[in-house]
Each structure stands twice: as structure tokens, then as C-alpha cells.
Image (spheres, rainbow, N blue to C red):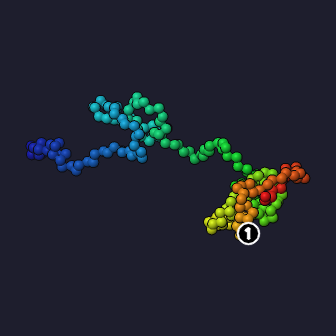
Amino acid sequence: MAMASTSLSTWSMASLRSALPPSPSPRLPSFRFPTPSPFHCSARLSSGRGQAKPLRSFSGLAPMTPLLSVGIGVANFDHVFSNISNGSKFYAMRHGKRVPKLNRPPDQRRALLRGLTTQLLKHGRIKTTRARASAMRKYVDKMVTLAKDGSLHKRRQALGFIYEKQIVHALFAEVQDRYGDRNGGYTRIIRTLPRRGDNAPMAYIELV
């Protein structure tokens, strides 16, 4: 018993700690933010031990940078908080965008205007509704303007819009003699009687 007591007394807590493998120290999670703070923070909130300690980030507004000071004269915090996306889409009001819809989706509306432009350049005069005549007017003027330029790039642009290739070549060949001295205003709209059945306002549109 005496030998056992003496052997136990030789072991101390320091020797036991030195014999054990070193335990890893707990590491605090590090946060990386994509953009630095736009304003310099000179004063920081300090804890009782005098170490700088940033405030905890907000969970609802998701700030880009933690707030390190209080009382800084910043009037706008839009640059601090990121946009919160919940899957919905927001669109601005369409002020000043007066596009004639013609009761059709965009692809069908473009196909309709291309067909009307092709027929007008082919026949020289067509009858359609006033809304369609007013909508196609700028596209016809655009094709005539491309033909007056006469370059290969403009010809390819016209070929991509007009359906019939022969009309494009004829337009590029005859436009200088017909509209060489005219700057714009290549079409004319003449109102006529409404259409029977739905009483839609009709009009003739022709090349000048």
C-alpha cells in the first residue's frame, strides 16, 4: 500500500496534461462580404476588455457589411443592404412606351408587320385597318432608307425583314430614281369607309 501511494503521488496534473495530445482550439466562423464598407469607421463598439467587437448582423435585411459604429451621419443605406429575392418579378410602369399591340403577342405582331410591309412594297398600295397602317408605316420607311444606302450590310438587313428576295433586289435597284431627292415620308395613308361586320376603321396605305 505504501508503494502504491508513493507511485500515485509522483503523478501530477502538469505531467498528465503534457502527456495528452494537444486539443484543437475552437475557431470562430469567419464571414466574408463581397464589397467593403463605403464609409470609414473610426469609432468601434468595445467590450469590457477593450477589444473591438462588431455588432451582430441583421437576419431580416441581410446587410452586406456589419455595422461597426453608431451615430454615423449616413442618410441612405441602400448601398448596404442587398436585394431580397423571393421568386417574384417586379416591372416598372411603361410610361412613354406607346407600342401598337394590334391584339397580338410580340412574335405574331412582328410577323404581321413583316407581311404587310412585303405586300405594300410588292403591290404599291394595300387596304388594311388604320391601326395596322399606322404601325407598319415606320417599317416601310425603314426599308426604303436601307435601300437608299445601298451597301451590302443594309441589303442583308432588308433581306432579313422582307419575306421575298426579289422585292428586296428590285427595291434597291429602283429606290434612287424614285426617292433620291426625298428625305422621309415615303408612304401615304388615305382613310376609307369602315369595314362591314365589325365596323373597324379602314384605310389605304400606298407608296408616294
Secondary structure under the numbered disc 1 in the rendered image? helix
Residue position for label 1: 170
At 19% from the left and 45% from the top, the residue drawn is 17
| Observer able to see residue 5 | no
- Which quadrant does the C terminus fall into? bottom right
Q: Position of residue 25 (x, y in %)?
A: 28, 45
Q: Nearer the viewer, residue 115 or 16?
A: 115
**126 vs 30: above or below:** below
Which residue is the extreme one toward the front? 181
Q: Position of residue 50 (x, y in %)?
A: 28, 32
- Which quadrant does the N terminus fall into? top left
At 69% from the left and 58% from the top, the residue drawn is 142
For the image, the number of numbered tags is 1
Q: Position of residue 131 (x, y in %)?
A: 78, 51
Q: Position of residue 32 (x, y in %)?
A: 39, 46
**31 relative position to 177: left or right:** left
At 73% from the left and 61% from the top, the residue drawn is 179
**70 relative position to 16: left or right:** right
Q: Quadrant of residue 113?
A: bottom right
Q: Nearer the viewer, residue 60 or 145?
A: 145
**109 vs 33: above or below:** below
Alpha-carbon neighbours of circle 1 within 10 Å: few (<14), some, or many (≥20)? few
| Observer able to see residue 178 | yes
At 79% from the left and 54% from the top, the residue drawn is 188
What amino acid is labelled 1 in the image? Ala
Q: Nearer the viewer, residue 44 or 139?
A: 139
Q: Nearer the viewer, residue 140 or 97?
A: 140
